[in-house]
Image (spheres, helix red, strand yellow):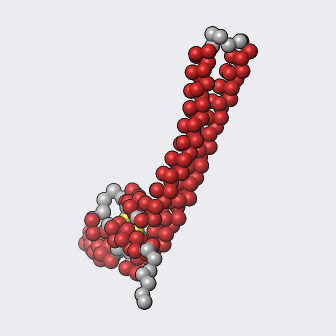
Amino acid sequence: MKKTVFFIIISLLAFSSVQAAEVKIGYVDMGKIVMESDQGKEALKTYKSLEKAKNAIIMEKVRQIKKLEEELAKQGAILTPETIEKKKAEHENLMAEYQKMRRDSEKDLQKNEAELFQKIVLDVKKLLAGIALEEGYIAVLDKAGVIYMPDESDLTNRVLKMFNEAGKPAEKTD
C-alpha cells in the first residue's frame, strides 16, 4: 500500500513538472508602457495642458476673492453696514463658485485622464494578446500583481518598442 501511494505521488509530481515546463507566462509593467510610449507621452502632454488651463481659470477666481478680501480689510471702517453686507454676500458667492469650479475641474480632469489613457491601455492589450497567441503564452500579467517572476518573463521593453513602432506612420517610398 505504501509503495502504491508513493508511486502515485511520484507520478503526479513528475507529470506536473513536465506540464509546468510547457507553460509560458509573461508579465509587463503596464504603467511604464503607458507613460513611456509615444502615445502615452502625447496623452500626458494633452492632460497637462488641460490641467494648466483649468488651474488658470481657478487662480483667476482666487485673485477675485483675495481682491475682495483686501478691499473689505482696507475699507471696512469707512463702508456702510449695508455695503459691508453686500461685500460679504459677494465674498460668499465667490467662494461657492470657487469650490464648485474646483470640484467640476477635478471631475473633468479625471474623466479626461481616463479617456486619454484608456485607449492606450486597450491598444496595448490588443498587442499583448497578439504576442501571447503568436508565441504560446498562456497568460500575460501586469507587473503590479506579480510578486515574483524571472526577468526572462518580462515583456515590457519589447512591447513598448513594438507599440511605439506600431503607432508611427509608415514611411513613404517613391
- Looking at the rendering, which quadrant does residue 14 occupy? bottom left
Q: Position of residue 41 (x, y in %)?
A: 43, 60
Q: Nearer the viewer, residue 128 or 97?
A: 97
Q: Number of marks in the image?
A: 0
Q: Is residue 26 visible?
A: no
Quadrant for the N terminus, please: bottom left
- Looking at the rendering, which quadrant does residue 128 occupy? bottom left
Left or right: 167 in relation to 11: right
Seen as rendered, the residue at the extreme right is: 82
Q: Position of residue 155 (x, y in %)?
A: 34, 69
Q: Residue at x 61, y 24 (%)?
A: 68
The answer to whether 61 is drawn above or below residue 84 in the figure is below
- Looking at the rendering, which quadrant does residue 156 occupy? bottom left
Q: Position of residue 114 (x, y in %)?
A: 54, 56
Q: Is residue 131 visible?
A: yes
The answer to whether 136 is drawn above or below residue 141 in the figure is below
Q: Residue at x 71, y 12 (%)?
A: 80
